[in-house]
Image (spheres, coloured by chain):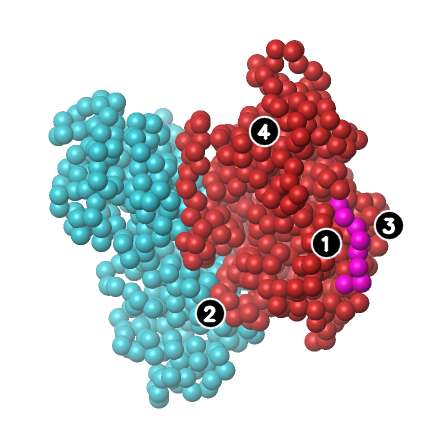
Amino acid sequence: MSQLRITGGAVYDPANGVDGDVRDVCIADGRIVASLPDSAPRLDARGMVVMPGGIDMHAHIASSSVNQGRRLLPEEHTLDPAPAPALVEGEARSGTGGTIPSTFTTGYRYAGLGYTTVFDAAVAAASARDTHAQLDDTPVIDAGFFVLMGNDVYLLAQIAAGERDRARDYAAWLLGATGAYAIKVVNPGGVEGWKRNVRTVQSLDDPAPANGVTPRAILETLADAARVLGLPHPVHIHCNNLGLPGNVATTLESMRALTGRPAHFTHLQFHAYAGEKGKAWASGATQIAEYVNAHPEVTGDVGQVMFGNATTVTADGAVEYLLHASSGRKWVNVDVELETGCGIVPYEYRDRAAVASLQWVVGLELFLLSADPWRMVLSTDHPNGGTFMSYPELIRLLMDRAWRDERLKGVNQKLLAGTALADGLAREYTLGEIAIITRAGPARQLGLAHKGHLGVGADADVTIYSRNANIAEMFATPRYVLKGGVLVVEEGQLRRAPQGRRLHVRPGYDTAVMRDLERWFERYGTVSFANFPVANLRDDAVHDAA
Amino acid sequence: MSNGAITTQQATCLGCGCTCDDIDIVVRDGRIAEARRACALGVAWFGDGVVPAEIRSGGESVPLDRALADAAAMLTGARRVLVYLAPDISCDAQRAATAVADKLHAVVDGVSSTTVASGILAAQRRGRVAATFAEIRNRADLLVYWAVDPAQRYPRFAERCGERAAMPLLSAGRTVIAVDVGNRHGPASADERIAFAGADETRAIGALRSIAAGHTDGDAAGDVAARAAQLANRIAAARYAVIIYDAEPAGDEPLADRAESLTAFAQSLNARGRCSLCALRAGGNRGGAEAVLTWQTGYPMTVDFSRGVPRYRPDDTAATLLRRGDVDVLLCVGDVAVMRGFEAGGVRRIVIGPRASTAAPAADVAVDTGVAGIHTGGLAFRMDDVPLPLRPPLTGPLDPAAVLASLAARVRA
């Protein structure tokens, strides 16, 4: 029985009301336990900060689209070779970094940052096998993914026919068949519109893009499906009109459409722009924060933009065409199997650029104006707004006002007049609040009862930091990281890289949908119905009602 | 079922890049007797499923342990190793082979560097516009076959997602245009044809690009420009056009910049309408090798681990390294027949794959394995990058992924 007592650290475990108290954390067989015999091995954490392992609830690390992005970026990989770490157990693998690191390097680097759980936020159902294979080669982290449904032609057909129960059964079947964790909606109806060359979504009631089915109907159907199926995470929504000036109106309309229903709105920074097309952009962060603050059923993540290289990779094909046309950068588009889209454009956010500077400000405003950190958590929409390697710098911006104000002075001011940040936001996040937006909050939003906290029974995913006046340095180099009780980082070095678990759900459904689906596959599909489901997932489902 | 026949339904065929996964395989007396729904190419690929199961080292039959020990000694003592991902292995075997290459600080490459390197490099410079089969099947109201008739090398393409597929989502009809380039013709059944002399192809695509960019005259003069304009207008008028070309044509060398030029043209058409480019790919899970190499190393081909990290060396392909004598040991995983024609004098060879023992010249170490999709399961990629499961109808010789895992445990970095 493997045991460890972490002694003397200042523990930040907000889910259990612990805010920097010095106390021991006891681990046995991969779980947190109440106590251990005195003879148990000890890890001296005196003077250090102890938190649960980090949880990234929205990143792009292992989809077919991500691999297309990797393939597109040899010039980045060449500049960031990643030698195999010196592991004391098991085979270590070399790789490459850049904005989309190779799979092994992705796992190693997340672990090196103290992150132990990551979700890929956009996987096409037809490519789920690809994602599982990539995750099999992404060590250390527990991982899952969200499966794309908001432009699935079968689902749209059910909504058009008024068959919302069947739509829900389909959603349940698809989650189980692909080994996914949650329902993802990207630009509801708008991706289908892009394929049909209808490029704008005028409103939530615009029937044109998706051949008669409105974005509102798609949002309502899938929000209800997630709720009725009892999924651990509500519908995860990337709203219409990403990246366009004035889109804050669309975002608020989407939130209002689901009033009273649990829903997660993702990378809100990209959806919080005031202004209008062809005119000056402005921040709409205040409006979003006010709405979220007043509506407890709404959760979000920020999708912060960080200056430097990024790669935009999304199922939202239409927006990537616009980015390609405006930036002149290379561009990938893949229309995927009557399900979704894929667009990729490498990008650089420059602090000399007016719009990028506004985006940076909008993200920080969302963090600083949101009253409840449990419901507005940290993300950069890796690698869209910046890579996960920039999280320590982002945490410093949130915790250190002097540093933030200094950085603010150095960015393009053209669009910043009158923004809340320019007018002065004094708030500084505490370590306890950082533990919420990077651990406890994502765990609660994802319904992961065993993660994001250090109470008895929790997974022994623990990150231990040496205190450092420079917050970014502190969060960039944890002293120790435990994953499932295994010491993966020791003295700042990755030493072990065990295989992580796959997090997925298997909701129940009326199997009558199968007969209809089989006919659909025969008529429209190009993969045999029997070959569509992913079989033999290694780990049991987190939520299993089937 | 009769006479003790066992049928495996929805098996996946790796005979070409169409990767049809609707094949019913009937096995009688341990042999494949029938491959229902398979095309002639697929029937030939499945064959009767009988493959040798020899393990040889130094010219004699040996136990697996001995072969692996010999192979490990050869690899560990090598100056520089080339790991080659040949066809007919699953992604699982490709992953295991890449792990061996990483551990040995070897070079790893696959078929793509010989057949589609120019297309891969073009996509890395420019990107790509693509659509998976179901999008083509259900959405394309215009198919343009550029110098290819899929009937010969991709026999079921037209039935799976081309002009012979049902198209219930399309309210309007579908038009097929054959672009004949020199002696490379599009389908005979096309609704319309446009012909260019082989020597005019570059000028023709250049003209198409100019017209798509809004320039009326283009670079080409006279007749070529007129025909290009006619074609460009037809494509631009489509709701969803798909241009189909053969990324791996047999025999004659493809035009080096065809992939890049067609990509640029197809991309530019999306300013106002929708257009995708479909690159026809050959079989054996070639796309899988690119996908696995990309996710493990960041690069889809020609990866050099000699400095302990993956480096991209698109000019130093397997064929080049062998010809120059830059490697002294070759570990070929998969069907080594694809390496016929490579100059590899003086290179010691380890082959782990289907029919390894029958390689000519004989390998120093040969471990016969099953064929992915016939004897072993796992994952493979269709030409449109859709991943599919393999449902082997037969049990057979060793699984190369398992053999490689044993080998990896024996080699020293």
Distance from disc 3 to disc 2, alpha carbons, whole Å, reads 48 Å
> In the rendered view, does B5 fall on the left or right side of A209?
left
Which residue is the site of mark 2? B266
Query: Which span of residues is magenta-colored?
Result: A422-429
Q: Amino acid at mark 4?
A: Leu
Question: In front: mark 2 or mark 1?
Answer: 1
Secondary structure found at label 3? helix
Question: In front: mark 3 or mark 4?
Answer: 4
- Marks 3 and 4: CB-CB under 8 Å? no
What label does residue A294 carry, if any? Answer: 3
Q: Chain B shown in which color?
A: cyan
Q: Chain A shown in which color?
A: red
What label does residue A402 carry, if any? Answer: 1
Which residue is the site of mark 4? A482
Secondary structure found at label 4? strand
Distance from disc 2 to disc 1, alpha carbons, whole Å, reads 50 Å
Distance from disc 1 to disc 4, alpha carbons, whole Å, reads 33 Å
